[in-house]
Amino acid sequence: MTLTPQSFIRSGLLVVLVVVVQLAGLDQMHMLGGVFDLIPLVVAASALYAGAISGAVIGFCVGLLVDLLIGQSLGATSLVLTAMGYWVGRFGELRDPGHGLVAIPIAAATTAGYLATLAAVTFMLDIQVSVSVLVLRDAVITVLLNIAIALPFFAITRRVLRPALKVDPLARARRSAAPRDAGPIGLRGLEV
């Protein structure tokens, strides 16, 4: 991501909008026992298209904003989302982020990793949290719900961040390879 005022404004507004929508609205809307969790999706989508360093910074900012708005101990969510943003960004730098279906496995992995790692960090920090077997069921349903909204969410995030990116994520998919000159089909093998 290019470091311009436009990129800071675009990513900042995206982060604030998603965190406010998540905490003010989507956390209270339960579907099949789970909730749509946009927090790992926005970090994963931003990191996939913007890169590792930008993904880590966006992950830290999202985590800090979530911790401040919820009023829990600072740092737990930031730690998890910073690492997640870095590794998804690193994956995006090494692989082709322009593939249309890459959002589905990334959404599944980041949501499951976010929920599991955040639970582990809160237990290590000895934050008083009640635990039951239903937590695992809710986590699986949340992962499935995030998979369901991954494709449109990643497309919207790509559209918002595209003017601020160094490389267009769809440019590799749009490039067509030069056609091979194989000769006429009927004369192959005749060495004419």
Image (tube, helix red, strand yellow):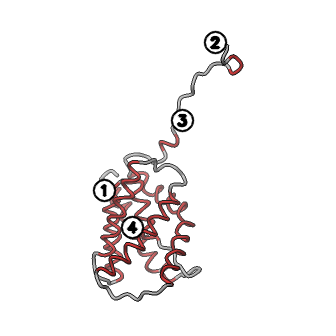
Quarter of the image where one finds residue 47:
bottom left
Quarter of the image where one finds residue 141:
bottom right
Identify whether 122 is placed above or below 179. below
Quarter of the image where one finds residue 57:
bottom left
State the mark number for residue 53. Answer: 1
Q: Nearer the viewer, residue 172 or 117?
A: 117
Q: What residue would you read off at disc 3? A: 176
Neighbours of disc 2 within 10 Å: few (<14), some (14-19), many (20+) = few
- The amino acid type of the residue labelled 2 equals Glu
Q: CA distance from mark 3 to mark 1?
A: 30 Å
Q: Position of residue 130 (x, y in %)?
A: 41, 89
Q: Earlier in the sequence, mark 2 or mark 3?
A: 3
In the image, 101: left or right of 70? Answer: right
Neighbours of disc 4 within 10 Å: few (<14), some (14-19), many (20+) = many
> Can you tell which of label 2 and label 3 is closer to the viewer?
2
- The amino acid type of the residue labelled 4 equals Val
Q: Secondary structure at mark 4?
A: helix
Q: Earlier in the sequence, mark 2 or mark 4?
A: 4
